[in-house]
């Protein structure tokens, strides 16, 4: 969606390494924003984005469609008023992130289907920062027999982080004040890491893993942040799990720092 940062650029670099043609789409997709969310204020920095991409390579095609091109029959923000074709990911899009953003994955799956139809990529690169999004899209490719890309060719790359604070890079970090960015937001990953460390020292039970995170989530709340959730989920069904079994699990969280909603996750006993 643009406002490019190192996390995005790493995906582009991966594509440049693994493919002979790279297409970058930059499109702020209205359908994935609920009416109360930040569609209007979402950072848009197209000129800077294009220069960053040009610095990586002269051989990148940048696809910057208009809303009318992507939604030729229009798009209503309110899902109840929408008509026509949309992709539903039944019993998946209402779990995890979907509890707080019930129409988000419908909007994402729909726009990514359109992008795949237009570009027909052999390979597609998504970030682990939005882990449920990437896994839902891989499942969509499998269920809908998508050929470009096949599910195996939808790659999920590790989350790029600030080298000092380990805060996950995100376009929405631009909303944060310097103090929020350096003092409060990094506590989200610290909490997740504490859960991961507990798991790696032998703890598998959800309650105990979540307990290990509380020192940092409490600290964040004392600093004015508001936890939306921190939860342990299965990576296929996205159901909450009571313990980490053989298939591993995702420990993920969302936190408000001021009005800015940040997400992050770590993988326990699994890889993508
Ligand atoms: N820190 C990161 N590391 C790796 N991939 C990332 C990172 N941040 C975003 N991506 C990936 O880049 C792609 C484009 O994401 P998007 O444009 O929504 O950026 P974003 O920084 O995640 O923005 P937002 O603030 O809206 O969450 C997605 O596949 C996303 O997972
Ligand atoms: C997948 C995506 C491009 C759909 O608009 C967006 O959700 C994103 O950038 O993560
Ligand atoms: N990277 C996810 C885009 C969104 O939050 O809308």
Image: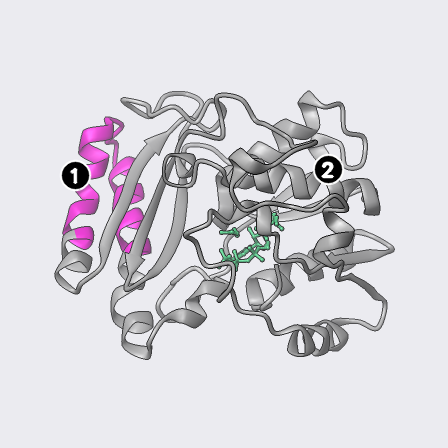
Magenta-tinted stretch: 188-217
- Where residue 174 appears, as percent x and y from the top left, is 44, 71
Q: Is residue 202 left or right of residue 172?
A: left
Q: Residue furthest front?
A: 81
Q: In which quadrant of the rendered view does residue 244 lie?
A: top left
Q: Secondary structure at mark 1?
A: helix
Which sits in the foreground, 195 or 178?
178
Secondary structure mostly seen in magenta is: helix
- Where residue 69 appears, as percent x and y from the top left, is 78, 52
| Mark 2 surroundings within 10 Å by alpha-carbon count, few (fewer than 14), some (14 through 19), many (20 or more) | some
Q: In which quadrant of the rendered view does residue 267 lie?
A: top left
- Where residue 56 appears, as percent x and y from the top left, is 73, 72
Q: Is residue 50 above or below residue 19?
A: below
- Where residue 193 appears, as percent x and y from the top left, is 31, 49
Q: Is residue 119 left or right of residue 109?
A: right
CA gap between label 2 and label 1 equals 37 Å
The residue pinned by badge 2 equals 153
Q: In which quadrant of the rendered view does residue 259 lie?
A: bottom left
Q: Which quadrant, please, contains the C terminus?
A: top right
- The residue under the point 46% across, 59% down is 38
The residue pinned by badge 1 equals 211
Query: Is residue 163 among the parts visible in the rendering?
Result: no
Tag of residue 173:
none
Q: Is residue 157 left or right of residue 207?
A: right
- The residue under the point 62% across, 48% down is 126
Query: Is residue 174 among the parts visible in the rendering?
Result: yes
Per the image, is 192 magenta? yes
Q: Which of the two labelled residues, at mark 2 and mark 1, occupies the earlier sequence position?
A: 2
Q: Is residue 80 above or below residue 223?
A: above
| Mark 1 surroundings within 10 Å by alpha-carbon count, few (fewer than 14), some (14 through 19), many (20 or more) | some
């Amino acid at each position: 969606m643009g406002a490019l940062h190192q996390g995005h650029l790493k995906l582009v670099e991966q594509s440049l390494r693994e493919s002979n043609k790279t297409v970058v789409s930059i499109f702020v997709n209205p359908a994935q924003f609920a009416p109360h969310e930040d569609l209007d204020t979402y950072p848009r920095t197209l000129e800077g984005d294009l220069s960053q991409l040009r610095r990586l390579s002269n051989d990148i095609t940048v696809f910057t469609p208009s809303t009318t091109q992507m939604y030729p029959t229009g798009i209503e923000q309110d899902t109840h008023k929408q008509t026509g074709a949309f992709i539903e990911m039944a019993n998946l899009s209402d779990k995890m992130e979907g509890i707080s953003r019930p129409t988000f994955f419908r909007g994402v799956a729909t726009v990514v289907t359109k992008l795949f139809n237009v570009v027909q990529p052999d390979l597609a690169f998504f970030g682990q920062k939005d882990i449920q999004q990437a896994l839902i899209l891989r499942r969509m490719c499998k269920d809908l027999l998508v050929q470009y890309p096949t599910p195996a060719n939808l790659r999920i790359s590790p989350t790029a982080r600030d080298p000092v604070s380990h805060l996950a890079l995100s376009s929405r970090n631009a909303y944060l004040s310097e103090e929020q960015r350096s003092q409060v937001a990094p506590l989200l990953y610290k909490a997740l890491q504490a859960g991961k460390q507990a798991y790696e020292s032998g703890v598998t039970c959800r309650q105990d893993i979540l307990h290990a995170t509380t020192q940092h989530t409490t600290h964040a709340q004392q600093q004015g942040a508001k936890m939306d959730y921190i939860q342990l989920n299965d990576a296929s069904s996205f159901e909450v799990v009571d313990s980490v079994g053989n298939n591993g699990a995702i420990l993920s969280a969302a936190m408000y720092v001021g009005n800015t909603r940040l997400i992050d996750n770590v993988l326990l006993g699994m890889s993508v």
